[in-house]
Image (cartoon, rainbow, N blue to C red):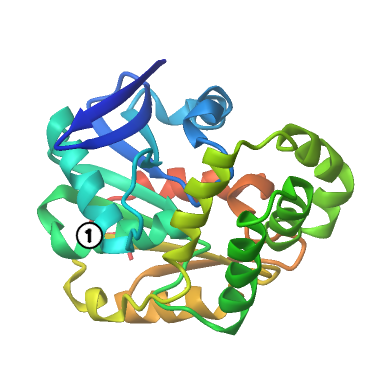
Amino acid sequence: MKKDTAVVNGIEMRYARFGTGKKNLLIIAGISLTDVVDSAPSVARMYRRFTNDYTVYLFGRRSNPPGRYSLKEMANDLKTVLDFLGIAQADITGVSQGGMIAMILASLYPESVGRLILTSTSACRNEASDRIMRQWVRLSESTDNEALVRSMIEGIYAPNTIEKYGEMFVEMNRNLTAQERKLFEIIATSLLDFDLRSYLPSIQAKTLVVGCKGDRALGVEPSVYLAEALSAKLVVFGEEYGHAVYDEAPDYLDCVFDFLHEENDAP
């Protein structure tokens, strides 16, 4: 595994790379309290079955964003980094906010995107996302790390996961720095007002949409809408999982793997 920082045109973005395959697979993570690249070893273990066919890249966000940072700016910054790294085309899996960035990439740069997996994501804000994002932004402006972490856990994970691992998650993130909270605030603020529906008609990539009935951050309706708008394959998990179905459901990656290995003419 390689961890590095791409520095280009004033952008600083960390990434991790693993696998030896000829094709590229990008994992665009959702918002996180800490840099997702620090979790690369565990992500690599989860995706180990992909590494013979793919060279896998894990991206978080720019580490030096401007004061206001829109989803389109995030997508364009990532495209700049991809060009810098020589990644001309890739299959992309985007989760939560990462799925929103993936949609913009697939719309603006269709030649750069092979297949597209959109998990626990939405084309526009809704009542559930407004409520939870306002709370996260407000808490990120305070110094109460524990309150912010607990709010995120409650919004992202299913009750069974919280019961098993909630306190461990709190301890892992108890010592957030002021810089980490500020970066989180900037990234989260982009979700207070967004509408990507105008991008959808120009997305050409074969797409899998994954939603979850137990998603308390978005609900399952945005996934149903995306699947219809994109004529995409839809997989819906049950109420036993939450927004983080990509971490919680043991067969989630089976769906991703099977989709990426389908024949081109498969429905």
Q: Nearer the viewer, residue 120 or 22?
A: 120
Please report the residue visible at 77 percent of the width from the left and 62 percent of the height from the top: 240
Q: Nearer the viewer, residue 232 or 248?
A: 248
The percent position of residue 87, horizontal first and vertical second, equals 17, 34
Q: Is residue 215 left or right of residue 40?
A: right
Name the residue located 57 percent from the left edge and 46 percent from the top edge. Answer: 181
Write down the quadrant of residue 170 in the picture: top right
Whether residue 205 appears in this view of the structure is: no
Query: Is 68 on the left-hand or right-hand side of 234?
Result: left
| Residue 74: x %, y % from top left | 30, 53
Q: Secondary structure at mark 1?
A: helix
Which residue is at a point 32% across and 38% down the rendered structure image? 25
| Residue 242 quadrant | bottom right
Query: What is the number of callouts on the image?
Result: 1
Q: Quadrant of the N terminus?
A: top left
Badge 1 local density, few (<14 within 10 Å), some, or many (20+)? many
The amino acid at mark 1 is: Ala
Residue 137 % position (x, y): 58, 63
Residue 43: in sight, yes or no? yes
Q: Residue furthest right?
A: 163
**Of residues 14 and 109, which is closer to you in this image?**
14
Q: Position of residue 75 (x, y in %)?
A: 26, 54
Q: Is residue 157 left or right of residue 121?
A: right
Residue 245 shown left or right of residue 87 in the figure: right
Q: Which residue is mark 1?
A: 106
Residue lying at 56% horizontally and 25% vertically, measured from the top left: 45
Image quarter (top left, top right, bottom left or bottom right) of the C terminus: bottom left
Residue lying at the far bottom of the rendered structure: 127
